[in-house]
């Protein structure tokens, strides 16, 4: 029975390989398109757009810098794993896994830089819309003034243009405000839009004072966000240093037991499991700290 099954599989493999290359290429292209469409639907923002902006800001890794990161991670993983197990095969496996972790960490870094850029654009948007409203006394005219000022860049600029078009099409600012609030769920954006909604729909006795207070609130929020960034940077440095130091506690164990005694312990299967567990748990916490440092930047 096993021989028959193997024979059928072999025939299927030969038939598949002899199929036309054009069909295979068409299928591959279709699958790639479907995967891209799925990613575009579920991703918080386009990775292609984010990567393009990172390059424009000059923050992208060069091929040499990326290769250096891979070599550094693989080398560090090799040293740590060899000190733990004194096994070449295990060392190579850990080095390979560490090398594959570099793209993920780079992606987290891209998200942080892009989030910081978007937050700065949002800060510019809110501050200048308030300044424009003091002159125009019209929310849509304020948006047009900010749009034409040249101080905004995509993606925020494109969304401001969409807000203007929606306002003229619908004859109201309700949908445009809801659209922008969903795209950029920042506290200061929602507060500012709510204030403009009240002024436009319900009127206000002293809109100038309200807008001045809103400007002060935005300044306070921005200051808090930048303070949080500095705190995160300090936390990140201490966290990574402490996490790497924990890996090398095995050297203290070998010093206390003696290297020969430690190597004998490695013959016990449960000792290997404990050591692997220590490495994996420490790596998990390091990745958790890395995600905390790079994610939700600019969220008040």
Image: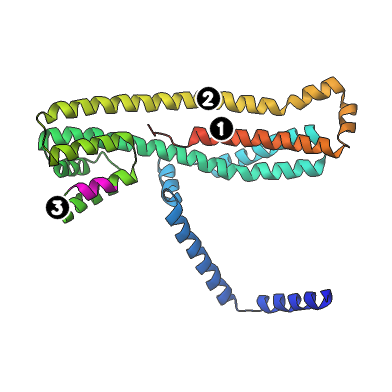
Eye-nearest disc, 2 or 3: 3
- From this view, report whether residue 5 is shown above or below residue 97: below
Q: CA distance from mark 2 to mark 3?
A: 49 Å
Residue sitting farthest toward the front:
202
Q: Main secondary structure of the magenta part?
A: helix
Q: Is residue 73 visible?
A: yes
Around disc 2, counting alpha carbons within 10 Å, would you say few (fewer than 14), some (14 to 19), or many (20 or more)?
Answer: some
Q: Position of residue 216 (x, y in %)?
A: 25, 24
Which residues fall within the magenta stretch? 173-179
Q: Which residue is mark 2?
A: 235
Q: Position of residue 51 (x, y in %)?
A: 45, 47
Point out the tag, 2 or 3, that comes first from the N-terminus.
Answer: 3
Q: Is residue 73 magenta?
A: no
Helix, strand or loop status at disc 3: loop
> Mark on residue 289?
1
Q: CA distance from mark 1 to mark 3?
A: 47 Å
Q: Residue at x 66, y 41 (%)?
A: 98
Is there CB contact under 8 Å for labels 1 and 3?
no
Is there CB contact under 8 Å for labels 2 and 3?
no
């Amino acid at each position: 029975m096993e021989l028959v099954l193997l024979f059928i599989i072999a025939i299927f493999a030969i038939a598949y390989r002899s199929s036309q290359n054009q069909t295979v290429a068409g299928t591959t292209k279709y699958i790639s398109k479907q995967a891209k469409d799925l990613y575009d639907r579920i991703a918080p923002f386009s990775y292609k757009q984010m990567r393009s902006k990172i390059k424009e800001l000059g923050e992208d890794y060069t091929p040499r810098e990326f290769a250096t990161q891979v070599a550094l991670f693989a080398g560090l993983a090799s040293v740590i794993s060899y000190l733990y197990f004194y096994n070449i095969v295990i060392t190579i496996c850990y080095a390979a896994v560490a090398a594959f972790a570099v793209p993920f960490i780079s992606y987290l870094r891209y998200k942080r830089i892009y989030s910081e850029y978007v937050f700065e654009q949002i800060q510019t948007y809110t501050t200048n819309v308030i300044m424009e409203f003091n002159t125009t006394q019209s929310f849509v005219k304020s948006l047009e003034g900010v749009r034409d000022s040249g101080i905004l860049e995509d993606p925020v600029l494109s969304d401001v243009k969409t807000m203007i078009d929606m306002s003229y099409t619908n004859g109201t600012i309700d949908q445009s405000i809801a659209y922008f609030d969903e795209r950029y769920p920042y506290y200061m954006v929602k507060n500012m839009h709510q204030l403009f909604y009240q002024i436009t729909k319900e009127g206000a006795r002293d809109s100038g004072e309200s807008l001045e207070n809103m400007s002060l609130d935005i300044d306070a929020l921005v200051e808090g966000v930048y303070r949080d960034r500095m705190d995160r940077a300090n936390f990140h440095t201490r966290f990574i240093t402490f996490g790497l130091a924990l890996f090398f506690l095995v050297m203290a164990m070998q010093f206390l037991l003696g290297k020969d005694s430690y190597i004998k312990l490695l013959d016990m299967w449960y000792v290997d499991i404990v050591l692997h567990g220590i490495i994996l748990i420490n790596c998990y916490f390091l990745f958790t700290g890395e995600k905390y440092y790079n994610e939700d930047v600019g969220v008040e």
